[in-house]
Amino acid sequence: MRAQISQIALDLCVESGYDAATVEQICAAAEISRATFFRYFASKDDALLGDVDAIGTELLEALRERPDDEPVWRSLGYALGALSRTYGADPARTRRLMALMDSAPSLAATHLAKHAHWSPLLRPEVSRRLGIDPDDRTDPRPHALISSALSCADAALAAWSAADIDDTATTIDELLARAMTAVVP
């Protein structure tokens, strides 16, 4: 049901425009009540972009699975690979969502706000890997690494979604690696 509502929300937003599509219209198209919609999603943005907390937890778990002696930048790249594979699992939906974000600045801003939720979640593990106190907010390195890695993921998604839909030669993972190598060769 969650995936079905999410797909209907995306279809309506692409068809009508992000700002014009309302939760009420999504509910009508999905033949559900507002209460049911809000049982699954906190907002229209959540229906489009996914569960911020669940994705952040997935990233953290993927980061924790990496070897302790691996450079933190490489570990972040592998962890973000889990995110890129999620997006790559449904290429048509991802491309439509990226196009919608290009046309709806408020949705793009919500997407970037997800990063603000993920940074404090990832910070303790990145700090541990750097050998610094996770509570030391005077050291900018954890935040800089997390923000840079998330920006690389966004750049990879943007490049991938801009590619010809029939071009499957370049994966999101390959573009993520290329973006991360541009920052740290």
Image (cartoon, helix red, strand yellow):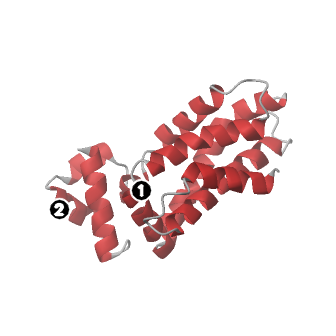
Task: Name the one closer to the observer, 36 or 72.
Answer: 72
Going from the N terminus, do you reach mark 2 or mark 1 first? 2
Q: Is residue 83 left or right of residue 134?
A: left
- Residue 142 found in image quarter: top right
Q: Is residue 181 left or right of residue 7?
A: right
Q: Residue furthest front?
A: 169
Please state which amino acid type lies under the numbered disc 1: Pro
Image position, residue 65 (x, y; %):
62, 25
Closest to the camera, between mark 2 and mark 1, is 1
Image position, residue 181 (x, y; %):
76, 52
Q: Image height check: is 142 above or below 150?
A: above
Q: Residues within 10 Å of mark 2 (few under 14, many from 20)?
A: few
- For mark 1, give the secondary structure: helix
Q: Which mark is residue 29?
A: 2
Are the residues at dot 2 and dot 1 in contact (C-beta closer than 8 Å)? Answer: no
Residue corresponding to mark 1? 91
Please state which amino acid type lies under the numbered disc 2: Ala
Q: Is residue 60 left or right of residue 92?
A: right
Image position, residue 62 (x, y; %):
59, 32
Q: Is residue 37 visible?
A: yes
Residue at (13%, 55%) from the top-left corner? Answer: 31
Residue at (34%, 48%) from the top-left corner? Answer: 41
Q: Which mark is residue 36?
A: none
- Residue 113 found in image quarter: bottom right
- For mark 2, give the secondary structure: helix
Residue at (18%, 56%) from the top-left corner? Answer: 30
